[in-house]
Image: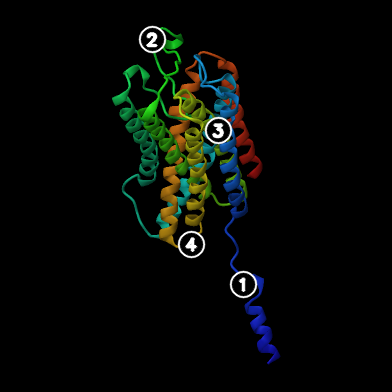
Amino acid sequence: EMDTGTGAALAWSPGAVSQPPPGLGVKLGSLVVLLLLPLACGLAPLWCFRQPPGTGDPRSPVLSLVSCFSGGVFLGTFLLDLLPDYLSSIAAALEGLRITLQFPLPEFILAMGFFLVLVLEQVTLAQRELAEPPEESRALLPNGCIQATAPGGPGGSVASPVPVAGAPGALRAGALALALALHAVLEGLALGLRQGDAATLRVLLALLLHKGAVAFGLSLELLRSRLRPPAVASCLVLLALMSPLGVGVGTVLAAGAGPRQHLCRAVLEGLAAGTFLFVTFLEILPQELGVPQNRIPKVILILAGFALVSAILFVKG
């Protein structure tokens, strides 16, 4: 009888309990950080600008430099971390299912993540152009600051505020916030699908830098659209909730152990990597380097962001 009791005790020993997935503690902490930091960055302009900002460039030099640094972090995260991990993950999943490909499926999935954000942005811009003159069409990403283009300024464009009031302005602002929110979900997936504390922290760093700039710029643009502060705060709360939502979904999918779950996780990881590709090469770097101010500091900060990720990966290896 004593031996039976001992066997029962051993059956319920902590060693028999399944261990939590790697990186779970960091992901749980990231839910709070990704919610509070972008919200704080977005609410800051509400305190700084009690009235809508006047004429001039909505993109402050500090915000532009921060965006360049985050662009370097995104570049390093994509090329040195997300892309290699995604390719190895989908290769292992296909091998587990004993699937032999005659088509470059991994690269195709990556391209679909790229085109998903591209189509979302262009559809939203097309809807905006139905109600605005062509010269007021502006890009949505990466920082939420929408710039109007007009001839005569440096590089053929100058920034100009577009006062919007009433229901059309609210609808356009809502479309902008929704586009950025959906983009934030896909970016959050990249964090939730990471395994291990070090990999999770690298993606979290990139997201924190980028989402802070996104929220700050979106708040400035919503103020320029002359929305009321409660409406601006609602859009910022929506944006702040999306990245934690993506992290939660990615964490649940990362816990799957079967080959089909591994393939599903790899596909979503490829889509998320495609969003990083879009943000880095079509939004952050071209827009920041296309403005003829602070060119050398911008390049230095891009290299610094890339070097930071490289150093973290080197120390880890």
Quadrant occupied by the C terminus: top right
Residue at 56 percent across and 31 percent down: it is 70
**Mark 2 is on which residue type?**
Pro
The answer to whether residue 96 is seen in the rendering is no
Q: CB under 8 Å between callouts 2 and 1? A: no
Mark drawn on residue 257? 4
Q: CA distance from mark 4 to mark 3?
A: 38 Å
- Looking at the rendered image, the quarter that the N terminus falls into is bottom right
Mark 4: which amino acid?
Ala
Residue that carries the numbered disc 2 in the rendered image: 151
Q: Nearer the viewer, mark 3 or mark 2?
A: 3
Q: Between residues 155 and 308, which one lies in front from this camera angle?
A: 155
Residue 88 visible at all: yes
Q: Nearer the viewer, mark 4 or mark 3?
A: 3
Circle 3 sits on which residue? 42
The residue at which mark 1 appears reads as 16
Query: Whole-Å distance between the Cαs marked 2 and 1?
Result: 70 Å
